[in-house]
Image (cartoon, helix red, strand yellow):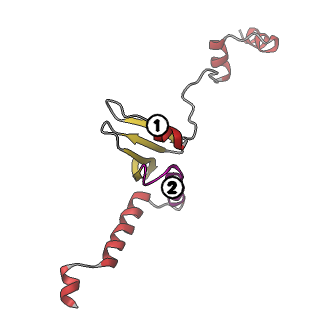
Amino acid sequence: MFVRRRLWACVGIRSESWYIRWYGIDTNRSDTNMALTDMEVRSAKPGARLVKLSDGGGLQLWITPDGAKRWRLAYRFAGGQKLLAIGVYPATGVREAREGREEAKRLLADGKDPSLAKKLAKAAKAAASANTFGAIASE
């Protein structure tokens, strides 16, 4: 059987199922992830259920049935699957979402959880404004 397969490869005869089994390559794949363009994001329509469009590197655009478009980043940290909210579509464009993905990837490379870093930054910003009753009373 090995000689026969080798002969087919040399002669150039290619049966699609044989080619996939032998080389592990599907020539008719329709699920390849191409980067989303702004036009594709703008023209994406909501469905009856949640629609997810992938941009690559874990970045996804979630389109809810009510029409909201939200950027999400799926990543793994400490052995578990996690999800990071990056922003809402017209306010956060494709470029900004990709920059958010790259920043999260840098944090992951440093061994930090991006969602925890985001929560800590938000808490620090809230503490800096400090318009709480205690802060005003102490003044």
| Camera-nearest residue between 46 and 98 | 46
The residue that appears at 64% across and 24% down in the rendered structure is 25
Q: Main secondary structure of the magenta part?
A: helix
- Residue 69, by quadrant, is top left
From the image, tell me which residue sits under label 2. 96
Q: Is residue 113 above or below residue 65?
A: below
Quarter of the image that includes the C terminus: bottom left
* Residue type beneath disc 2: Glu
Q: Does label 2 or label 1 sit earlier along the sequence?
A: 1
Question: What number of labels is visible?
Answer: 2
Q: Is residue 119 above or below residue 46?
A: below
The residue that appears at 54% across and 28% down in the rendered structure is 31
Q: Is residue 24 above or below residue 106?
A: above
From the image, tell me which residue sits under label 1. 43
Q: Is residue 131 above or below residue 42?
A: below
The residue that appears at 40% across and 41% down in the rendered structure is 62
Q: Position of residue 59 (x, y in %)?
A: 48, 45
Structural distance between the alpha carbons of marks 2 and 1: 18 Å
Q: Position of residue 133 (x, y in %)?
A: 18, 80
* Residue type beneath disc 1: Ser
The residue that appears at 57% across and 31% down in the rendered structure is 32
Q: Is residue 98 magenta?
A: yes
The secondary element bearing badge 1 is classed as helix
Mark 1 neighbour class, 10 Å CA radius: few under 14, some 14 to 19, many 20 or more: few
| Camera-nearest residue between 118 and 98 | 98
Mark 2 neighbour class, 10 Å CA radius: few under 14, some 14 to 19, many 20 or more: some
Is 60 positioned to the left or the right of 122 in the image?
Answer: right
